[in-house]
Image (spheres, rainbow, N blue to C red):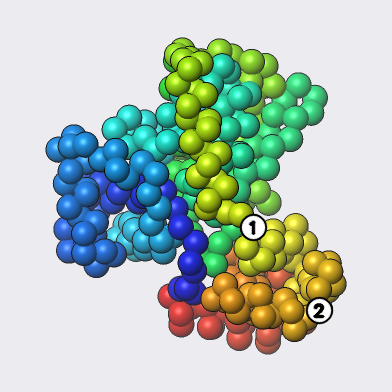
Amino acid sequence: MLGSNRSVSAMAVVDLARELYQRGIVSERDIQSVDANLFVQVQALIEQQDLSQLIERQYPEVWLVSLWHMADKRNPHSSIGVDIGATVSHKASGIINHLMQNCINLQEVLEVYLNSSSLVNPADTWQVKQANNQVSLTFSFLSDFIYPRCAIERSMISLYRWACYYTDQSLPLLSAQFTFAAPEYAQAIQKQLQCSIKYGMPDNQLVLPQSVLSISLKSNQPYLKKILQARVKKLIESNASEQPISDVVRTLLKQNLICFSSQAVTANELCMSRSTLSRKLKNEGTHFTNILNTARQQLAIENAHLPTKQIIDKLGFADESAYYKAKKKWHSSE
């Protein structure tokens, strides 16, 4: 895995470690291999001790990714991502969840989440479109790291289950789709979403009636919400006064990998020279080739169901030889 200096919510890391540990997927030693003190916090969460000091703390993104890969490698055919996503963990709520619980309706919840997701995990990317009385939520990870399928399942189902929790009702889903092929446990996904589901699609997406956004939340404390809003705003300003240029490059590659696979074209799009782009990426601990390779690898995984020729075209390789050479490097780095 490529190094990254981005951080995620400490509570998200501790809660995932707890879920995997209590389900027997990782051991105490596994968690300690991520960080020597992490298991102490996992035990504290299990014992319902006060972990309020972690609500605003951030941990390296690599810790979260490492835990997900442990889960994926230990049992790649299990529904662990689905199971964790379906679990609403009240004890592990971070400051963003506390704020969302005090919103007026789901529209406001969605706005809060999209505007402050950088405090939870900057790699989580949701695109929202409203048209024809429907709202579509399209999900992807934008990161130097490759997140496994179980992490995608968890993010998709968790968003839906939390929305149901906030409104205290089962929300109607019109459809859902995933980029990967139907897994052996597809029935577990069907049970959670209860709608038409398609696999092997271009995007990970949930589609709901637009009317659900006006549903009021079961609890709303305006005074507490104002306090939380002020605190979240301050945290966002201190955490990210400027968006990392590496994140901007990832976004461009996600929008059009073929076009922006050229560093010169990407630099021109960002109104800077190629050397300036290289310098800025180097200062962030990465470089263009690494980001491009990761984007290609992720896209290859998402389109594994397609014929090889189509995958090569989507990834912007000149020929099969270049594709297979890159694929060999991806496997050797795992």
- Label 1 sits on what residue type? Glu
Q: Residue at x 61, y 39 (%)?
A: 115
Q: Name the foreground residue: 129 vs 222.
A: 222
- Would you call the spot at circle 2 few (<14 residues within 10 Å), some (14-19), or many (20 or more)? some
Residue drawn at 77 percent across, 62 percent down: 256
Image coordinates for residue 66, horizontal then vertical, percent: 37, 63
Name which quarter of the figure residue 282 lies in.
Answer: bottom right
Q: Residue beneath label 1, please?
A: 242
Question: In the picture provided, is 52 more to the left or to the right than 316?
Answer: left
Answer above or below: position of 60 versus 22.
Answer: below
Q: Quadrant of the C terminus?
A: bottom left
Residue at the (45%, 21%) spot, across then down: 224
Which circle marks residue 273 in the picture?
2
Task: Residue 100 in the image: state x and y as whole percent.
Answer: 50, 27
State which mark lies toward you, 2 or 1. 1
Q: Is residue 254 above or below residue 282?
A: above
The answer for how far apart the CA atoms under marks 2 and 1 are is: 19 Å
Q: Please say whether residue 166 is visible from this viewpoint.
A: no
Return the disc, 2 or 1, that comes first in the chain's sequence.
1
Instruction: Indicate the amino acid at tag 2.
Output: Ser
Tell me where residue 294 appears, x and y as whole percent: 58, 70
